[in-house]
Amino acid sequence: MFEPIVAAGTEYWALAAGERIEFRHLRTIPSAQFRDALAKGRPVYSFQTLRGYVEEDRRHLREAQPDVVVGDFRLSLSVSARLAGIPYIALSNAYWSPYAKLRMPLPEHPVVSLVGLPLSSALFGIARPAIFAYHSLPMNRLRLRYGLAPLGLDLRRVYTDADYTLYADLPGLVPVRRLPATHGFLGPINWSPRIATPSWWKSVPAGRPLVYVTLGSSGQSALLPIVVQALGSLAVTVILATAGRGSLSEYPGNVLVSEYLPGEEAARLASLVICNGGSPTTYQALSEGKPVIGIASNMDQYLNMSVVQRIGAGRLIRSGLLSSALLRQTVETVLCDTAMKDAAQRVKRMIDAYPAGERFASWLRRAVDEYDDRRGRC
């Protein structure tokens, strides 16, 4: 039995209200800064930011004295957990694995609007190793600062370096080659906050397709008017979660709006889920056997949706090419596509047979036991 302690920024603490978990405040860069770096193709974390993170990590680890530390894109733990001598488990997605066999797609970038998508994609294919190397520099500099060997110039190693690396994905969806024994598939991690449902929740009209829309905390709120315009003209009912990022003064009569919605329940009710293409919401939808339209902006979203589209369970739309006409046509196509619905149902059955919680507990115990063995502790 493990007692969890969660160190996180305070921005979303309210969503975990009612959970029996000890929370500790962790300094993080603002979400807007994170999104801006992604949009402009800059490294998300500077050396100075990462160094500050390491010192804060080390303080928390000294005070909490955990038996194992688990990080979800807290890259500084690659240094701080090792310095503290605590086994470190990194959560990631298999498409970021150095062992994945995937082509890296071009995310949204200002150069696309300047020279067009075909030429931009070709140039990105040539420049991608240098771009990944550039993004790897802050972490390599950080590791050298604390006496650790650099990780090389493959950004995927920076994103997944740990004593144990667990992929929140199903095995077989992302092609990988010869994973080390310390890497493994955990399965999708689905979670919805315990929040009050809006007043309209129990009176959602029946009799026509229900479309659940959430562009998420990292989605582009500027896309919301286009999405609403497209769906407002269709014979569907829309339930929309804004995540507090943008709203309109007026919505069509078939669009029901709330800041947050219980995602698992919303996906269960829906015929189709539209999101920013990130893995949490797409897996939430696929766990209910529902197809996904992902309007992707950053590299993570493109990688995830390329996998979903490859297995036939959804459609990828580039956010830079989004129009009301394109989205309307895509929604109509997906709602009538029985093969896509069947593919989503197949993934649901795979998820049902691959519970992440049991595997996570097993990896936690393994990490602690192997560390105790190394230290000669009973």
Image (cartoon, rainbow, N blue to C red):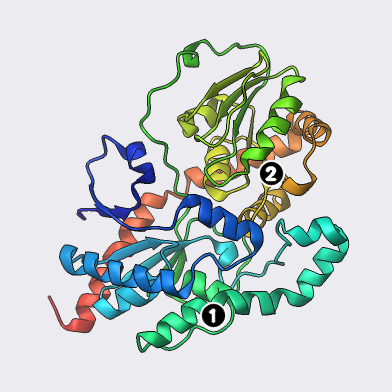
Q: Residues within 10 Å of mark 2 (few under 14, many from 20)?
A: many
- The answer to whether residue 369 is left or right of residue 209 is left
Q: Quadrant of residue 204?
A: top right
Kind of residue at badge 1: Leu
Q: Secondary structure at mark 1?
A: helix
- The answer to whether residue 280 is left or right of residue 254 is left
- The answer to whether residue 370 is left or right of residue 40 is left
Kind of residue at badge 2: Ile
**Does the CB distance between marks 2 and 1 fall below 8 Å?**
no
Number of marks present in the image shown: 2
Residue named by callout 2: 295
**Residue at the image position 74 percent from the left and 76 percent from the top:** 127
Q: Quadrant of residue 288?
A: top right
| Quadrant including the N terminus | bottom left
Q: Position of residue 238 (x, y in %)?
A: 63, 22
Q: Earlier in the sequence, mark 2 or mark 1?
A: 1
Disc ID at residue 196: none
**Residue at the image position 52 percent from the left and 50 percent from the top:** 32
Q: Quadrant of residue 48?
A: bottom left
Residues 16 and 112: in front is 112
- The answer to whether residue 56 is left or right of residue 162 is left
314 to 373, vertically: above or below = above
| Quadrant including the C terminus | bottom left
Residue named by callout 1: 137
Q: Is residue 186 visible?
A: yes
Q: CA distance from mark 2 to mark 1?
A: 30 Å
